[in-house]
Structure formats: structure tokens, C-alpha cells
Image: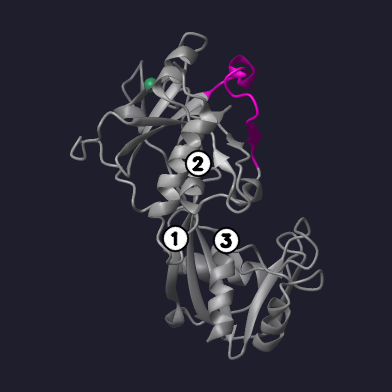
Amino acid sequence: MIAFANELGAAHARTLVKAACSAQRVFFSVPEMDRSLDGSNPVEGKEVYVPIVDGSLNLIKEGAGTTRSRLPVMLDRGQVERFKGISKLEIARLGDLDGTRYFAVDLPHRELFGSVLDGAKAVSRIPLIVEDMDERHVAVLSYARGLMWFHRNTRFCTMCGSTMNSVNEGRGRACGGCEKTVYPRIDPAVITLVANGNKCLLGRKASWPKGRYSLLAGFAEVGETLEDTVYREVKEESGVDIDRNSVKYHSSQPWPFPRSLMIGFSVNALSTKIELDENELEDVRWFDKEFIRARLRLGGNEEFNIPPKYALANRMISEWIAE
Ligand SMILES: [Zn+2]
């Protein structure tokens, strides 16, 4: 008999919530998961499959509780075997967690699986995944989504144009024509807290919610050290010079939407004059620590607010104003 997704999800939710540590977690990270493929961590045949629709959508269900009540849809092997009869499925092994082996499975057409996935909602936006969901579930969903995005976007060989196929239990893809093998690539992006005494530099993009300000950020380019990227991005986005010797690593955060790694740094400014490049940001300003503290004490508003708690920028700004 096929177990319904919500029952399976509820059982795993209880296990995960019970085991979740109380310390602050890096969102979208699940360090407890053993990703090794060597079979050194035997499980008792327990397997679950995290479905991703069209390589980019997560499936969730509303739970019965009032807090952290939303659950990821997880499938059992029987369901996946049944779906295999309907369509070719891409499957990748994620890792082992609490005695259960997790896989990601790409469902190419949600409508084909409608009867079993009834009531599930396909979501793309990050806030909709994070909201009211256990943080380890969030991490597993985002990991599955990032890996399935890789499979979806690596269908053909860049050397010879032949079809590529999944290898290494879904951790890579190999070409059927020239034997080229590829693995998921990660894009490193720096996010920088530029301080000048009790002021820090924050900017906003025109597309962001009203009043939203955040740290300056950007992707590393070919041939750069991360320190070079920090210097260049701050200069490009604000015109401010920084003290290269003051660059300090803060922490990092996976951002698999689809494949970034955020790397946080703090630096001291050498200059304060702002030269805004309007192609990059709508506004950049120095904000006083006390101003930020006072606004955030009220939870932020349309005059001033910062990115949500799940973003590294929130953590870095919150820690800085607490110093
Ligand atoms: Zn090839």
C-alpha cells in the first residue's frame, strides 16, 4: 500500500523537530546530514524522496499544528516506483540523516502525479519555503532543489553536444559521447559589512520591499581572491575605499537558488564619500548603529528594515549592532 505523502512527512517532521538543536542554525544548511556515498553509514532500508517539480519548485503541505506547521512533501519508494512507470525520473542521493536515506527526485510534470500529490502546493519563492517550517526541513528542501537544478540545466555536453546522464548516484553527470564528467558548480558571492566607527554602509535595490536596506554584495570574478572581490564590489557599489588589511571573515551560508554560496566579511572603511552607481543600486548610505538598533527594536518598518532572519545579512547586521 502506498503511504500518503502527508503521513510520511508528519512522521519525519516529528523526528526532525525532536532532534533539532536549539543553537542558532545557518539557514539552508544541514551539517548533520552524512553526504558520503561509500555506504559507511548503513541505514535500515529507510528511504525518503524529496520531490522537486520542473527542477525548481518545492512541494509543501499545510500541517495541523499552529507553529512550524508546514511540512515538505516526501515520497516513499513505492510512490517513486509508480511514478517511474509514468515518466522518466531523475533521482539523486542527498545523504543520510537520523537513520534515513534522503533522495531528491525531479518530477517533470506535476499534473501526472496529481492524485498522489493532492493538496500539495508547489512553491518557488524562498519566504514561502522558510515560513513556518522546521529549519532542517528547509535545508533538505533547498539542497534537493539546488541539485535538481543542476540536473535540469546540464542536459547536454558543452564539449560535443551529446546527451549527459546522471552518474555517481546523482552527484554528477557524464557525457555519452566524449566521456566528459561534470559536477555541480557553486558561485561564490561575498557579502560585506563596511564599518566606519559607529556607522555602517547599507544599500538598496529598486526592486526590494520599501525601506529594505542590506549589506553590499556581489559575485567573485575570474582570477580574484575573495578579498579582491570585497574591495571591488564595495568600490563599485558605493565609491568607498576599504582597508584591505582589515578584511575579516564572518561566516558563510549556502544559497542554492540555484547555486550560490554567500561568504560574509567585515571591513573598515578608509573613506566615507559615497559615489552611487545607479546601475547597481538605488541608494547607498551610512547608517548610525543607534538608528538601526532603534528601528529593529520595533521590528523594522517602511522607513527602514533589513533582510529576513534566514539571510546572512540579517545575522551580520544584528551582531554588529549588538557589539
Ligand atoms: Zn561530450
Q: In which quarter of the image is the N terminus?
A: top left
Counting from the top left corner in percent of width and height, residue 226 is at 44, 64
User: Residue 247: percent from the left, percent from the top?
Assistant: 45, 77
Look at mark 3 in the image and give the residue it sits on.
Answer: 311
Q: Which amino acid does label 1 sit on?
A: Glu
Residue 242 against residue 5 in the figure, above or below: below
Q: Quadrant of residue 182?
A: top left
Identify the residue at horizontal 50%, vertical 57% (top origin): 27
Q: Which residue is drawn at 31% across and 22% down?
A: 179
The residue indicated by pointer 1 is 224
| Magenta span of residues | 107-124
**Cα distance between the residues tagged 3 and 2:** 16 Å
Q: Which of marks 3 and 2 is nearer the N terminus?
A: 2
- The residue closer to the viewer here, 184 or 42, is 42
At label 3, counting other C-alpha atoms closer than 10 Å, the crowd grade (few under 14, some 14-19, many 20 or more) is some
Mark nearer the viewer, 3 or 2:
2
Q: Tell me if residue 162 can be seen.
A: no
Return the residue at label 2. Answer: 141
Q: Does the magenta stretch include residue 233?
A: no
